[in-house]
Amino acid sequence: MINELIEVLHLGIKGKKADGVCIKLPDTSTLGIISTKNKFPAVPVIINKLKHPYSKVKYLFINSGNANACTGSIGMRNAKDYIRALSRKLGCVSENILIFSTGIIGEQLPIKRIINSINKCDFKFKSSLKNASKAIMTTDRYEKWVVKKFRISGVDIEIRGISKGAGMIEPNMATMLAFIFVDIKMTKSIVNKILYNCTAESFNKISVDGDMSTNDSVAFVATGLNSIDLTNKKNYQIVEQNIHSVFRQLAHMIVSDGEGATKVCKVSVTKAYSLTQANQACYSIANSNLFKTALFGEDPNWGRIIAKLGSLNKIRYNPNDVILKINGITVFMKGVPTNQSNSKKLISSMKNVSIDVEICLNSGSHNANMFTSDLSRKYVQINSKYST
């Protein structure tokens, strides 16, 4: 499948490390993309939006090590120059190529080295998914790739995905890129529906540091290599569930690889007055520096959670109805801590890599959750040394 359509390149951005990937899409492909909402979008984000609805796209080209963001007219010219070089090499027109970048903001691309690398590349498209995922890394500690297989209507289906991201991770995209491929034929409307549904429940429910980046995109490709009747409700549900599983795995890898992270925490808000309020409470607690540093210190500091919740003026609930659980242990209810709020069992559970926090508001029927990581000394060290 997609393994036979990948070329990894050495563009000269990250020294001798692989830092470029070109992915060839089958002619039967249908593509959907969601990009960052940052008001300072990088050049690739701007260019890709101009090419929507992507019906003519044949190649995806990714570079790491340089974001090509906040680079002005020079950055735009550089991007167009290497797209032209690619189109000549690949025998297509510029409209057939979408580009993606990740890395340092505000620096110009080493455009001569990039074009020279493109011109020298044979583009045999024989690279592996693992090598592609490694080539798009920046501050990531490890490559992120997933292969999932399932059978439906007597047909064996594969879903393959790669992603990168470790910092600037916040809902509505982050400093991350993700590319997911399923070898099923889909209409444009189904591709977009699955993309938006799966992104909403995966990449838009993670946070490492609450910062939104300038570059980030999720691309979902239905390659069209197999025909499945997706008008059949059961078939559609099976397909979407399996695709969602890949989105979720990649998103969880990003949080687990959060810069300096030692913990992954699931924050759940249940029985909220509205879904908007449930999400707001989740985001606020997950992004609280006091809460995140307590996670790093393996401290079951329920007071920081309650204090943050109490600071949210637009959340409707009765304080005496709130129930807080940490790792399944009730630590706060009826406005006061329980006798388990400082128990040995609770303290011991904080040594786990995975932490679970549940806040029941008892004010409605809406639930939300998201994943976050702790805030460690290592995070500060990494980002104090990392240029824009």
Image: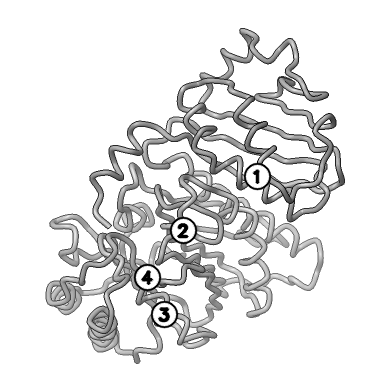
Q: Earlier in the sequence, mark 4 or mark 1?
A: 4
Q: Which residue is mark 3?
A: 46
Tell me the CA gap for discs 4 and 1.
30 Å
Q: Residue at x 63, y 73 (%)?
A: 192
Position in image of residue 359 (x %, y %): 73, 34
Alpha carbon distance from label 2 to label 1: 17 Å
Mark 4 or mark 3, which is nearer the start of the sequence? 3
Q: CA distance from mark 1 to mark 3?
A: 31 Å
- Determine contact: label 4, label 1, CB under 8 Å: no
Secondary structure beneath disc 2? Answer: loop
What residue sits right under mark 1 in the picture? 282
Few, some or many residues within 10 Å of mark 4 (<14, 14–19, 20+): many
Q: Helix, strand or loop at disc 1?
A: helix
| Mark 2, other Cα within 10 Å: few <14 / some 14–19 / many ≥20 | many
Screen quadrant of the C terminus = bottom left
> Front-most of 176 and 243?
176
Q: Kindly report which numbered mark, 2 or 4, lies closer to the viewer in this rendering.
A: 2
Question: Could you tell me the amino acid type at mark 1?
Answer: Cys
Identify the image quadrant of residue 175: bottom left
Residue 161, image x and y in percent? 48, 57
| Residue to which mark 4 is pinned | 100
- Select label 3 or label 2 by which is in front: 2
- Mark 3–mark 2 Cα distance, whole angstroms, equals 16 Å
| SS category of the residue bearing label 4 | strand
Determine contact: label 2, label 1, CB under 8 Å: no
Foreground mark, 1 or 3, reads 1
